[in-house]
Image (spheres, rainbow, N blue to C red):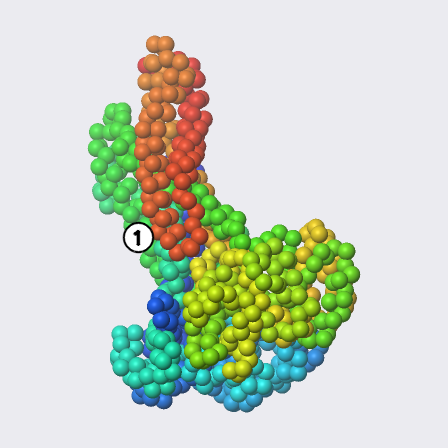
Amino acid sequence: MNNITQALKNLTRRGQHNIIKILCLGIGFALASVLIAKLWYEHEYDTCYPDHDRIYRISEKISRGSDPEATYGNTPGGIATTLKKYIPEIETATRINPACNDEEMKINGERRVKGNIYVVDSCFFKMFPTRILEGNADEVLAKPYYCLVSRTMAERMGGNVIGRKLELTSIPGLTMTIGAVYEDYPWNSSFHDYDVMLSMTTQRSFSYDGQDNLAGNDRYYSFIKVSKGCHPEQGDFDNKVNEIVSKFLALLEKEEIKFSLKFTPISKYHQEDSYFRQTFLMMMILAAVILAASVLNYLLIVIGNTVTRGREMAVRKCYGAMPRNILGITMAETLLHIVLAMMLAAALIYACKGSIETLLSTPVSSLFTGKGTLFLTALLIVVFIVSALLPGRIYNAVPVTTAFRNFTESRRRWKIALLAVQFLFVSFLVCLLLIVNSQYSKLTDFDLGYSYDRLAIVNVNQIKGEKRSAMVTELSKMPEIEAWTAVTSPLFSNGGGNNIVDPETGEEMFNATDLYMAGDNYLDMLDIKLRQGRGFNANSDSLKEMMVSPDFAQKLKNEKKWKDVIGRKILITEHSQTGKDLFTIVGIYDNFHANTALDDDDRPTMMFHSDPYGSYISYFLLKFHDLTADNMQAVQQRLQRLYPDETIIVDSYARQLDTWYDSVKHFRSAVMTAGICALLIALMGLIGYVNDEMQRRSKEIAIRKVNGATAISVLRMVLGNVLLTAVPSAIAGAILAGIVAGKWLEDFSVRTNMSPWLFVAGILAVVAVIAATVAANAYRTANSNPVKYLKNE
């Protein structure tokens, strides 16, 4: 206790730089603890369910002909239940059909609320139990037109929700009765955003019911729970699965489609994503760099204090202090510094709570819970031991004779080594930041093959059929609007596909990306050129028309040995309800990039004609003469007046596209934050080092000045010593950044060019900041009167 009291008294003692130590540790702890907590949070994803190690998500693996095998996370609706029926090792099976995302619903026909709606079967809560706050979940999932809502959703509705009616604005007439309320799943659960769960018995009343399909309608999330000791991922019942596939899906083999299933433990499914793995690794590196930088800087300052505190420790030894007493002093000081640093870190985290939650897409309160907190505590104990034992060892090595003579030991090699590592960290983060920023710019500036700079988008999903006629009329009158058209979805959100079927043989020929429905003048709106044929227009006598990409046309020519595809009729799965439901190819458009720059889907594309009133139309695209915030607001207000009971939002197409790159943007912000923190920590250490060196060499510098040295030559000498360490360290950091960034970029289909000039710029920036800091801190001594330092000699 006496050591703690003495450490408190020494906090503001001149020359020990305790405030700087605590500040550096606090900044480092704040950022490192947030990153480490996030890493542990991701590591524990989907482990909140009982027996989670026995729950598996089913994926399907498909290859057609000579095409490479592809794995899809969704399956047909009947896969899980069929496997349970024929494989005794499976105890429970359940499936989920995602129905609506961010859907607007009416409560008792009045108040509106938005939420995500999923269709689940009666076994969902048996596999994924959570506390049922009101009602009976099993009974609700057995009844048609009944649903459950989460606690958060119930609170948004105003509470007391049992028995209230929910009506989906996008599906007029579909009214659900709330029968139960369940506790929210944790944030690191796949089901956290499930606001409304609808009974699967209701599905057939508002959409195609494929819950029992073994082929087609592959949109279900399928899960099984196996008996203890069974490991499907290791092939425990592969033979039985193959028998089931051969028995029920023999038709696929005739069409040269290879179909198999993959079983992934639910706790590993989230971690299997390649981009997640690389980002996880990068965040781990960032956390390690920041934590190491703060601890090394702490040790650098402690070692720098050896000159001033060496005599103090020697005097203590003269009065009988034993090595354990010296170690007790350093441990008490380190403990106090770490406690104060943690308090500072907590204050910083609280102050930056909003930014952290935006950056990590996770509430801070969810990060510091459970085992993650225990891991952080263990890590702090390790930091405490290292930060206390090393200074204790150094001070115990100070000879007793130091008390009776000038102590000149500088431990310069220790300081230089610690500085070198910190310079390496800073250079690594700066160069990494330049590459990540370059990649983000590459993605946002990527040429998708069409123009959208004057486009805005309006969701009309809640306005069905002929109710859109007022909007169609109004858009044609608005002076701000140059043109408009209707689409199923914007190009950046497409990802589904359908198979092309030979109308003569009924065989599936190949798979293509389905852009679904588009209205008149769609190509003109996006400045996409028409290579052959014609586009969609209102004068067409049929809506059974489609346009295709050049790759689509070429594949079709190769399959059917046709010279031309214009005017040809084909069948498309999902669109063709019967063998006679043919679609005519009327045009071939120039290639463009469907989806975003993050997606490497190289399948051919197709789109189908629809009028603005079609059931598949969910959006209107508006082309402005001048796309400004004022013009969009004016259009939105006029449309809102037409539909006062609906929510109309006019948003920029470019802004919505950019949100798809938020993950890269947030990672860039994380690297930038880590780089700034590492730079501040390193500069504090550098300032302390320069001040110590100038104090230690003040008499030497004074003698040099007496012998004719100028302030410039003194600065050159000091800078030379530091730059001998800084330049190689900065180069090493840049090389390390290149290796790490290269690994990170592997998961992008569109990659930036890692130009050597990026690394040169990073190295020069780091060296320039270091040189400026050294010069600013050394200038006073270099320019001072030498008599000041020699008058006592």
Relative vertical location of residue 765 with respect to residue 384 in this rendering, above or below: above
Single out the residue that lies furthest toward the top: 707
Question: What is the quadrant of residue 519 in the picture?
Answer: bottom right
Where does the C terminus fall, quadrant-wise?
top left
**Where residue 473 sits in the image (x, y, percent)?**
76, 66
Q: Residue at x 76, y 70 (%)?
A: 470
Relative vertical location of residue 277 with respect to residue 47 in this rendering, above or below: above
Single out the residue that lies furthest toward the front: 563
Q: Residue at x 25, y 38 (%)?
A: 394
Q: Nearer the viewer, residue 238 or 488?
A: 488
Question: What is the quadrant of residue 703 in the picture?
Answer: top left
Pointer 1 local density, CA inside 10 Å: few below 14, some 14–19, many at least 20: few
Residue 394 in sight = yes
**Where residue 617 sits in the image (x, y, percent)?**
63, 71
Determine the secondary structure under disc 1: helix
Relative vertical location of residue 618 with respect to residue 550 in this rendering, above or below: below
**Where residue 411 sits in the image (x, y, percent)?**
27, 32
Residue position marked by numbered label 1 in the rendering: 382
Residue 770 in sight = no
Question: What is the quadrant of residue 296 in the picture?
Answer: top left
